[in-house]
Image: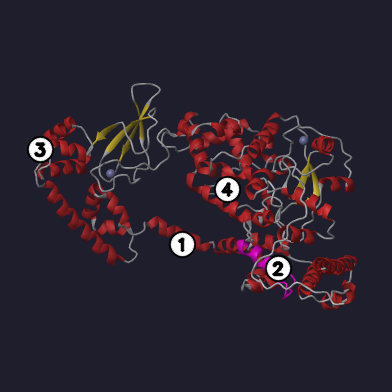
Amino acid sequence: MKPILHQNNLVNIEVIELLPFFPTPYPDELLYSMFARYHEWSQNPEEMHTYFDLFGNRATPTVHFPNRLNDFCKRLSTDTLLTPEKLINEHTIFPVYRPFLSKERSEKVHQLMMSSKSANILAVFGLTAIKICPYLRYCPTCVQKDEHQYGEAYWHREHQIYPIRVCPRDKTILVESNVHASSKINGKKLLTLQNYLQQHPYISAIETSDNAIEYQISVDISWLLQNYNHQLNINDLYYRYVEELKALGLANSKGTVTRKELFYQFKETYSEEFLNRYSCNLQHSRKYTWLDSMIKKHMNRFVIPIRHVLLIRFLGYWLSQFFSKKDHDYLPYGSPPYPCLNIASPHYGEELIDSYNSIDSGNRKIKTGIFACQSCGFVYAKYSNGNREKSEFDYVHTYGTLWEDKLLELRRNGHTIKEICDLLSTSESTVYRRLGMVKDRPVNRSENFLIKRDEIRSKWLSKLTNANEETINQMRAVLHYEYSWLRKYDQHWLENNSAPAQRYIRNEKIRREYKWEEIDQQLVTEIPAVVNEILNDNFNFVRVTKEAIGRKINKIHYITVQLDKLPKTKAVVELSLETIEDYHVRKISGIAQNMREREEKVTASKLISKTIKNKKHLTERIQRIVKYEVQKSLFDTEQLILEVF
Ligand SMILES: [Zn+2]
Ligand SMILES: [Zn+2]
């Protein structure tokens, strides 16, 4: 009898198969560990099948920064409490990294972890594989505690933070397993800690650290894992570092750090041996060290978490203390830039003021911030204890010509004093006083001023449009008078109407010389997507080789001939390559799946003849997979018949 089969006409609707079960996460359990426990319970013969269950394709997420979390959560039963956010915050190590990235970069990483797009997340950080733990690690003391409390040991997040080597719970020195945790894309093993320990019973005695700083640092890092709800990012931290260095006398009031003294004191605090052990040494020969990256605002280079912890401890804080300080302690007037609050100016409310001067107010605890707009000459003042909005000030320090011209203009046009008060939102006494002070100025000055300004502006603009890449410095030489005038009276307009400065153009040239670095950076983000495209192509099976990757990105010579010039790309490519056996396993499963979809009978001989060309490739593993696929097909058909009748 021929079984009656369902017809599925809705080809475009993605059918998602829910997982029949998923293990409940333990506290601080690594997501990888949960996947490994699922793998064990499911009794799937290969990791590949488990990844297919979990994500609907064979792409392997990385251990430290797994992606496809949306895909995964869609496969959990509807009453699950797990969401992509919860997984990222409570079951990956990303919370340790987040505060040390800019807001944009951390959002990008967050999105990549949720999305099904393949990308090299470490490349977004600017990190190479060396800066994460290459193997999973565990704490023998926690193993005993977990076995007692939960009946099994599991992989903890806390134990996977590079380069921490002590357990924050019990000071035990962590033990490195031989389970790969690097960003290997293809064919990662899923092994539970319990299973690993059965295969590798540990004999060595439990060792604990007697180094107090080492232990405190691991506690600090672990604090970040538990307290992921703060909103701080690298820009806030940079600001705080500089303010703290000012308080220690290691930076001047403008925020320039006394580098030599800082380095000297830093090395007094931490021994060279200690810094070396944590890959945090400060070599003399190098022009820029990691410490420089942390005190130079626009370096924009990612610095690994432990280095921030070292600096914060140097500044005299535990991480938790430093993070719970209020912004108001550092930024009494909010973060820069600040608005011009000259109501007579067309740019009122625009944030044109980059910094302020802090002066004594007569009271030791209260400072006065002086905010000057370079564009219109208006200067206002705020008290540091005022807790005011950015759009409010305590008093006007200087009104400036633009405001005074407006006052005269309103008066000339016949407005009453009361109307002027409303229009300039000021008091009658101020209006009388100011009018008294400016009444001797020639009445038509503001008109003359405007005529002159327009003349100079148009002269400047005509030169600018003819200039063709001429720089502002060259323009200055030709139009010396106009330039000085505009700089003095019309600076904001001048800034918006200038050719790019010389400095900028020079940087462009320098950057072009480092072409390989650029190409490397570009390719390293492209490769994972290309590899996954090859891995997920179920019709045209191609083994992942250098040539295959090169052909796919249309740059075969980069991947085959020039690869040594592209170190990051090289690392990712080499980790992605498939062995012949891996390739055969993937092809057999793919073909079997296609046959099931076409409702064709899956037999061992068909699978082997379509895949294996050479008898020596018919390994034990291949035979096991063939058997599994044949059985799976039988099972699916029986299920279908049962459903129909
Ligand atoms: Zn422990
Ligand atoms: Zn202004």
- Return the disc, 4 or 1, that comes first in the chain's sequence: 4
> For numbered disc 4, what is the local secondary structure?
loop
> For numbered disc 3, what is the local secondary structure?
loop
Q: CA distance from mark 1 to mark 3?
A: 55 Å
Q: Position of residue 30 (x, y in %)?
A: 73, 46
Q: Residue at x 20, y 32 (%)?
A: 427
Q: Which mark is residue 536?
A: 2
Q: Is residue 293 visible?
A: yes
Crowd around label 2: few <14 · some 14–19 · many ≥20 (10 Å): some
Which residue bears the numbered disc 1? 509
Please state the extent of the stretch shown in magenta in the rendering: 524-547
Of residues 437 and 592, the one drawn nearer to the viewer in this rendering: 592
Place residue 190 in its image quadrant: bottom right
Q: Which mark is residue 302?
A: 4
Q: Position of residue 555 (x, y in %)?
A: 62, 72
| Circle 2: residue type | Asn
Q: Quadrant of the C terminus?
A: bottom right
Q: CA distance from mark 4 to mark 1?
A: 24 Å
- Return the disc, 1 or 3, that comes first in the chain's sequence: 3
Q: CA distance from mark 4 to mark 3?
A: 58 Å
